[in-house]
Amino acid sequence: MTKDIATPARTKEILKKYGFSFKKSLGQNFLIDTNVLHRIVDHAEVGEETGVIEIGPGIGALTEQLAKRAKKVVAFEIDQRLLPILSDTLASCTNVKIIHEDVLKANVRQVIEEEFKDCKEVMVVANLPYYVTTPIIMKLLEDQLPLKGIVVMLQKEVADRIAATASTKEYGSLSIAIQYYTEAKTVMTVPKTVFIPQPNVDSAVIRLLKRDKPAAEMQNEDFFFELMRASFAQRRKTLMNNILQQYPVGKAIKEELEQQLNDAGIDPRRRGESLTIEEFAKASDVLYPLLKTK
């Protein structure tokens, strides 16, 4: 029986065998701690009826552990140099398929429909390259894919921002954009010492479980997100000042805008970072007719 991929000795042996050198531009950091991988798979609650999408399998360390528990694993790998390595390291994993494609350009919905017909649920589980974490998560959520959830390793600072609550310094438009679609929780922190090469920062694993319906209802979803981003444009400014900066048309009706916010129970002198998702939904409903339909 071969040793697990995620040990320092086996990882170095594989890298040496293929003369593999890390590409900084692809954010490649390989995990060399099997215990960490087991815990990631545990937090994703992967079982024999689960289909798993992995992004950036590297040399297959996490893929191998997922394959032991999942019905099927489909991994997207952008780096062509890793394809022969993966076909070697995962040779005994008959339930794994590697797709050589950038997940940001892929038709993930079609992959789910074609590859996971026999699976009861689909999870995304990945050790994401730091430089492209947010675009990947937002694509998976905005595309409204039939996922149960997403469990990913990312930079701890980004995980803190995603899981943050209102009135904390980490809370911002990213927190709201992701929590609108999911319930977010940081489930473990991971030291930089369990990677080759070691990154400069600590990592965390975040679990995002898809909500049955978005966290709040509003008349116009596009305006909700637009208003929310505008409210964080300058964090030290009040909600009202940020709104007037973003929507100059509002200057002539400032008092009416303030009145509408007050009537909705939102003090216009508050800062954007103090508003919950529900409050942003209320604000967008009362301001939409004044700022967008004039």
Image (cartoon, rainbow, N blue to C red):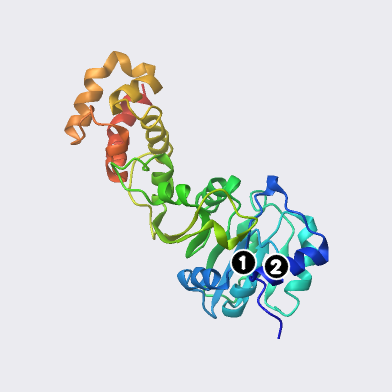
Residue 57, located in which quarter of the rendered image?
A: bottom right
Q: Quadrant of the N terminus?
A: bottom right
**As rendered, which of 42 and 157 lies closer to the eye?**
157
Please state, as top left, top right, bottom left or bottom right, where the C terminus lies in the image: top left
The residue singled out by tag 2 in the image is 11
* Relative depth, front residue between 29 and 129: 29
Q: Position of residue 230 (x, y in %)?
A: 40, 30
Q: Residue at x 79, y 64 (%)?
A: 16
- Residue picked out by circle 1: 32
Specify which label sits upstream in the sequence, 1 or 2: 2
Q: Amino acid at mark 1?
A: Ile
Residue 172's place in the image compared with 92, above or below, is above
Q: Which mark is residue 84?
A: none
Residue drawn at 65 percent across, 67 percent down: 74
- State the residue in front, 275 or 64: 64
Relative vertical location of residue 238 with respect to residue 284 in this rendering, above or below: above
